[in-house]
Amino acid sequence: MNIRHSRRLTLAAGLSLALVVPLAACAETSEPGGDDTLSNLESFTVLSANENENLRNQLDALAANQCAAENEVLPLEHQTTAQADTVQTITLRASQGALPAHFIAGTAQVRPSGDLGQANLVLDLEQALTEAGAWGNVLPAAASTVKNVYGHMVSLPYQYNIEGIWYNKAIFEEVGISEPQTFDELIAASDALLAAGYQPFAMPGSANWPLTRLMGMYIHRNVGPEAMIDVRDGNRELTEPEYLAGAQALADMAAAGYFGEGFISTEPAAANAAFLSGQAAMKYDGSWFLSNINNAEENQIGAENVGLMPFPGVSGGAGDINHWAANAGTAHAVNPETYDSRVADWLVCITENYGAQALESAGVISGFAVNSDVTGVPATTAAVQETITTIEQTVLWFEALFDSESNSLASSNVSLLTTGQMTPEQYMTELQSSLDSNR
């Protein structure tokens, strides 16, 4: 019998965790897929954000139907915390040895270098689900994204978003454009759209992130899927020519007028309207944009005229057009100290059924396989869900692995880059200096 000893964390200065103190006899648990030793759990307690009512609704629906047997053995119980208080709440609960069976957590906390990761307080879900015979219920794209973001498979992908270029099929057909496969083709298509009187891109420049996304995707296509991981780890620098090319490409797109007049102050709602009214032919956005596309009052061009394509490849680059940018929402980890066969059964049931349940009842795309027929799902949503099932590897967005100070700098300076007030060299040099000083 392999009995795992509980670990408690001692609070250091502030709320950071500094010391792990092994305790001799708290909750006895079985290793994933191991013996029948049960923990002292009396419920399958899930701690989620106050704001995430949909997750609670979906789990309640599973508990009443597909997971009724699991719920009979170990009843589902909800606990909540404000999203903004997540790190503080989890730090306190961990220090008290009182983490729930399944809990929301901060991104940095669950990484291998984070407080929970270092203390082995997050379950390896790939190992657990593989041993339970349920790993196939997690889509490869979602697994890739979770590992990219958190450094290992420690979060269930209740939400899953891919990012790409939404385009107006009718305008493309009118102008004689096919989906660009290379960045050069994207530039040629943009020039053709301008000549035909269309704004190539709807660009909410006030939000900044759509601009850095384009730059980041160019870099991933040019350098390869490890581009930003290598920067984080100090193996590459943003001032190298292959990275500078991304900043130059973005600056050139802005200078060519692809984003329209006054794009730098355009609000997201105005950019959505420009695309959904047919004023602009393309828009870089995530799959969360489906809620706008599927809104008949908002979408004047018709959902049937909206397509989604990945950011194109860069000629001679090491990246792959099939490496979509993606994110998997907030971390939802499992407590290894209370993991037993009853919790394992819950995880198997969730991974088997959540994908279809959330898609049919709420139109939510998750990182789980859709294992049963669903009805009433808009065609565009179904197409995106189908696309996700074909993705094997994903990449993160430009700032995803930056420290908070550098993350803010990347966003605030991108407006200067795209208005010509800062050169690509100045932009990347200042950003690299910030990364170096925050290591």
Image (tube, rainbow, N blue to C red):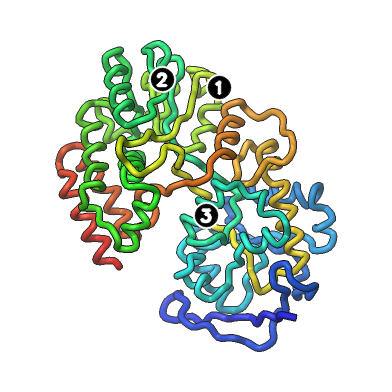
Compare marks 3 and 1 and give the one earlier in the sequence. Answer: 3
Image: 343 above or below 12: above
Image: 409 above or below 8: above
Point out the image quarter for the C terminus: bottom left
- In the picture, residue 334 is in which quadrant? bottom right
Q: Which residue is mark 3?
A: 146
- Residue flagged by tag 2: what amino acid is it? Ser
Residue at (43% x, 47% y) in the render = 395
- Residue flagged by tag 3: what amino acid is it? Val
Q: Nearer the viewer, residue 313 or 115?
A: 313
The percent position of residue 124, horizontal first and vertical second, equals 60, 65
Q: Nearer the viewer, residue 184 or 101?
A: 184
Direction from residue 343 to residue 291 in the image, left or right: left
Disc 1 to disc 2, C-alpha distance: 26 Å
Image: 22 above or below 78: below
Q: Cβ–Cβ below 8 Å for labels 2 and 3?
A: no
Compare marks 2 and 3 and give the one earlier in the sequence. Answer: 3
Direction from residue 411 to residue 130 in the image, left or right: right
Residue at (55% x, 45% y) in the render = 160
Point out the image quarter for the N terminus: bottom right
Bin the neighbour count of mark 3 within 10 Å (Cα to Cα): few under 14, some 14-19, many 20 and up: many
The percent position of residue 243, horizontal first and vertical second, equals 26, 48
Q: Which residue is mark 2?
A: 178
Disc 3 to disc 1, C-alpha distance: 33 Å
> Which label is found at residue 296?
1
**Total residue callouts:** 3
Q: Cβ–Cβ below 8 Å for labels 1 and 2?
A: no
- Residue flagged by tag 1: what amino acid is it? Ala
Q: Is residue 208 visible?
A: no
Q: Secondary structure at mark 3?
A: helix
Q: Nearer the viewer, mark 3 or mark 1?
A: 3
Q: Secondary structure at mark 2?
A: loop
